[in-house]
Image: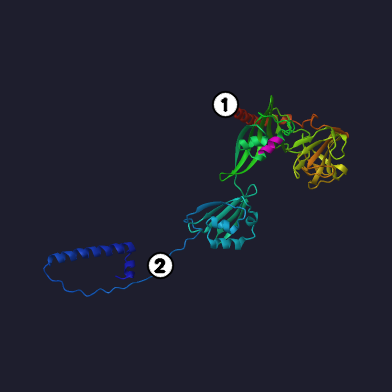
Amino acid sequence: MEKSEILAQGWSLRELVFKRRAAIVVGAIGLLAGVAALGTVSESPEPPVARATVVESLALPIADATSAAVQAYAHEERFERGDTFATLLTRLGVDGADAVQLVKQHGKAKPFRALRPGMTVQAQTTDYGALLALRFIAGRDTVLGFAREGDGFRVIDEPAKVARQVVLKSGEIRSSLFAAADDVGMPDSITMQIADIFSGDIDFHRDLRKGDRFAVAYEAFHHNGRLLKSGRVLAAEFISGKKTLRAVWFDDAEEGRGGYYAPDGKNLRKAFLRSPLEFSRVTSGFAMRFHPILQQWRAHNGVDYGALAGTRVRATADGVVDFAGVQGGYGKVVILRHHGGITTAYAHLSGFAADMRKGEHVAQGDTIGFVGATGWATGPHLHYEFRVNNQHRNPLTLAMPAAEPVPAERMSAFAAIARPLVAQLELLAEVRLAALE
């Protein structure tokens, strides 16, 4: 029977094979029966069967890397110092041809420029190494990479889809705030925020005591289960001796501003910060001292803070730049003018922040310069002065006025936010005390 006849009758290839096998089996049975019946008859010689070897090329289907049927495999590697993009792709199991094509097509694209040592890169490939997609987080919340599109690749540049989580942590001071934070796995950015929040009431250079405790609720943002960044402190508590300080973040949409307030609505932000440096040590206070350069006793009308060269110096209050330049023994100095006849001076700087010129407005906490050793200085430090109507005052002992509290008409909205956050801090404290018992 010819192939065309078979197809015309609608037989499938499987049916044809089955029918041929059945015919062979029936023929074999008949042959055995004949041999049994004619067992005494001598067999006549059979002519030899001609044999031939047939070789045919079978066209195998080539899998389409973009097909939904293709199995995708996930790989993850860190981009290490000394790596090239090619070596990274090799570790990710990407086929060499795709690697060459990707570099050729997008060698100057943003993902290539943004990749830095330490970044974790995720790739999807087929089982034979064809690249389907490659992604990594750049900066804080941007996903960069490449995705297969037809015979080439397109650039991925999109916001990361993040999940927000509120994290609760508590700790006890044994040596420093940073050491205590490290002990409980709290990131430095949150530690810095705690120090800034309570800086108007606690001098973290001098006032910390062993046994002081803190508790904090803060934001953490994750992408695909991986911590992407830590966000804002939502609520914090600091207990030093018999003094308990609490702070709650209130973002007042109607007023267009946000800040930290005590649970009763008082503003925790003082009109002036206690220190122009976030972390340092006082090396010389507001008193008479023997001047190391002039070699004579003189009144030291400011406070000296020891710090590494290049440490950022921040404005202790909102103000206007009155002077930024070089001035005698002060070296490079910034002088700010504030309300109420108050001025502050920041001397021996190594350099100034951008736009530090007379008349420029600065906000509390803005960086105005960097620690140095210019002028009459024997080493890197910051000399800070606080003057009222041109009279020097000791900023370490001066009572600093607080900023405005939560407006009366916004107290109900503030209380709705503050109550659950304070309850979380109290619960955290109870859990910690129970664990210590």
Q: Position of residue 108 (x, y in %)?
A: 65, 60
Q: Residue at 12% of width from left, 67% of height from top? A: 39
Whether residue 385 is in magenta: the answer is no
Tell which of 271 and 210 is nearer to you: 210
Q: In this rendering, would 146 be left or right of 23?
A: right
Can residue 12 be seen at all in this image of the molecule?
no
Report whether 225 appears left or right of 205.
left
**Residue at 31% across, 71% down:** 2
Position of the N terminus, as image quadrant, is: bottom left
Residue sitting farthest toward the left: 40
Q: Which residues are magenta?
A: 190-195
Q: Quarter-wise, where is residue 98 in the image?
A: bottom right
Give above or below for 112 relative to 320.
Answer: below
| Viewer-side residue, 418 vs 3 | 418
**Which residue in the structure is indicated by mark 1?**
434
As shown in the figure, which amino acid type bears the numbered disc 2?
Leu
Residue at (18% x, 66% y) in the render: 31
Q: Is 375 located above or below residue 395 in the figure? A: below
| Of pointers 2 and 1, the one earlier in the residue sequence | 2
Q: Residue at x 20, y 74 (%)?
A: 46
Amino acid residing under circle 1: Ala
Residue 168 in sight: yes
Q: Position of residue 228 (x, y in %)?
A: 61, 45
Which of the numbered marks, if any, corresponds to residue 58? 2
Badge 2 element: loop
**Which mark identifies residue 235?**
none
